[in-house]
Image: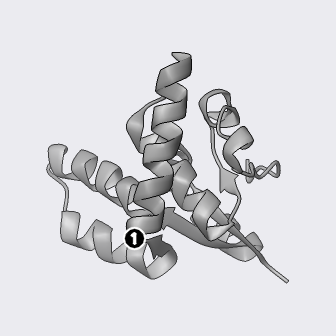
Amino acid sequence: MKKEVVIDTSYLIMLLKQQKVDILVREYIPYIVDISLYEYLRGEYYLGRDVDKAKKYLEKIFNIIRLDNKIILKACEIWSKLAKKGELIPEPDIIIGAACIINDIPLLTLDEKDFKRLEEYGLKLEKTRII
């Protein structure tokens, strides 16, 4: 049985560049958070590529986790606790982490250093690598 996993933006970009999305889909039920969809598509737009085509492709492959009140409140809680400790990480990472925590889905990332800080708030990191 396939395991669910959320892919962060950097891992998404790497999979697409190396054309390894098919490997991911064989091994996992893949998700991305809508902030990753935004981050990826803004890069495509900047490069002058067909953003509509890229968006449709990603929405066909990935389940999209949309921000809701639970995720927003969890992200606010995490941001506040990290800020008080002087340990802030990038805001999109906080939102992605909060989405994973609320939906109880592990995260597959290339940026374990920052996301490791979110484990104390309930984030689970997927250890298996596609590449």
**Quadrant housing residue 56:** bottom left
In the displayed orientation, state which residue is furthest to the right: 1
Q: Is residue 72 left or right of residue 15?
A: left
**Disc 1 marks which residue?**
66
Percent across and percent down for residue 22 are 62, 70
Q: Is residue 62 left or right of residue 121?
A: left
User: What amino acid does circle 1 point to?
Assistant: Arg
Indicate whether 20 appears above or below 88.
below
Percent across and percent down for residue 105 are 68, 65
Indicate whether 126 appears above or below 32.
above
Percent across and percent down for residue 72 are 40, 57
Q: Residue at x 41, y 70 (%)?
A: 58
Q: Residue at x 29, y 55 (%)?
A: 38
The total of numbered circles placed on residues is 1
Work out whether residue 20 can be spotted: no
Q: Residues within 10 Å of mark 1 (few under 14, many from 20)?
A: few
Work out whether residue 102 can be spotted: yes
Q: Residue at x 72, y 75 (%)?
A: 26
Q: Considering the image in quadrants, where does the N terminus appear?
A: bottom right
Q: Residue at x 30, y 70 (%)?
A: 55
Q: Relative to the observer, which residue lies in front, 79 or 1?
A: 79
Q: Relative to the observer, which residue lies in front, 34 or 123?
A: 123
Q: How is the image coloured?
A: one colour
In the displayed orientation, state which residue is furthest to the top: 86
Secondary structure under the numbered disc 1 in the rendered image? loop
Q: Relative to the observer, which residue lies in front, 50 or 11?
A: 11
Indicate whether 53 appears above or below 115.
below
Percent across and percent down for residue 96 are 50, 52
Indicate whether 97 appears above or below 30.
above
Q: Relative to the observer, which residue lies in front, 33 or 68?
A: 68
